[in-house]
Amino acid sequence: METIHNISDFKHIPHHTVVTIGTFDGVHLGHRKILERLTNNAKNTGLKSTVLTFFPHPRMVLQKDVDIKLLNTLEEKKQILETLGLDYLIIHPFTKQFSRLSAIDFVRDILVNNIKSKRIIIGYDHRFGRNRNANIQDLISFGNTLDFEVEEIPAQEIDDVSVSSTKIRKALLEGDVETANNYLSYAYMLTGTVKKGKGLGKDFGFPTANLHIVEAYKLIPKNGVYVVKSNIDGKEYFGMMNIGFNPTVDGSKKSIEVHFFDFDGNLYDKKIQVDLLHRIRDEHKFNSVEELKEQLKKDKNHSLGLISK
């Protein structure tokens, strides 16, 4: 898969394409049906499978007062799409100026002249152009003039995408990672850089990696303790992660801290991805540090039991 960060950079590519357009946040099971349709179509027609997506998310630009939380950072989305057999991923910068393109300008200048689209796979409810005033019937009409075909994604598949996204966000905010992971078809991930924390975990015998996530738009699941795994330098490590405020030690700032089992090394300033497997409990304020230590031992045993299943 080749990733292109501006539509105009596609001009040098000498291939005709079959294109689908969307944000594909989460790249979940509903999205995969559409992307499978795209790649199969490419194989059957000899066209190159191409996903056109935008960053920032259009709602971040057009509805700045709305606090939007996304399931994937841009890098995570690229990483997942990379595994799906696409030829091209175009991530075009979304700006207010771009949003003002008329429907015909978008189709003619972007989809046809730049991306060389010969077929466009789109949902029945897709709207595009300035003020989103054009629909699939307009696209079919443009296709008759500009020499491309339009394939409509059935309502059922589009509804599946909408339902899946809603259920995944709801599940994560309720701490139900198993349900979220089932809809995603992979473990929900948090990606960040390990920064120095207070070092209290080490004093308790549970040293932690303090995960700093730059992307403020990334959805962080419900506070609590989770069973996790990471790939560090090519080796898989399991552990447990706390999302919250560490109330027992007067924590006032929310943090994401991971204790890896059987890991002995320095992770400071290292970028790591943490996959969430299970949530084992809420965050609690304990009566003493000793009580917290005892609970951490129980959490570890509980986690190891879940990992061994």
Image (cartoon, rainbow, N blue to C red):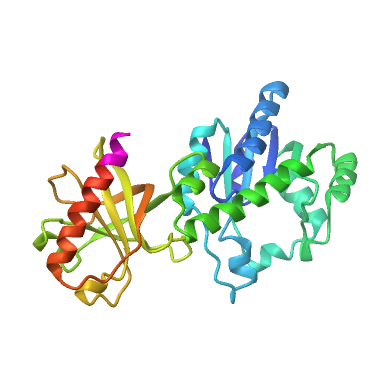
Q: Judge whether 266 appears above or below 40 on screen.
A: below
**Residue 109, percent across and down?**
75, 50
- Front residue (pair 180, 102): 180
Quadrant position of the C terminus in the picture: top left
Identity of the residue drawn at 27% across and 46% down: 303
Q: Is residue 260 left or right of residue 128?
A: left
**Residue 298, percent across and down?**
21, 52
Q: Is residue 286 left or right of residue 104?
A: left
- Front residue (pair 131, 278): 278
Q: Is residue 199 visible?
A: no
> Which secondary structure type mostly characterizes the magenta part of the structure?
helix
**Residue 196, percent across and down?**
19, 64
The residues colored magenta run 305-309
Q: Judge whether 131 appears above or below 296 on screen.
A: below
**Residue 94, percent across and down?**
61, 60
Identity of the residue drawn at 73% across and 38% down: 117
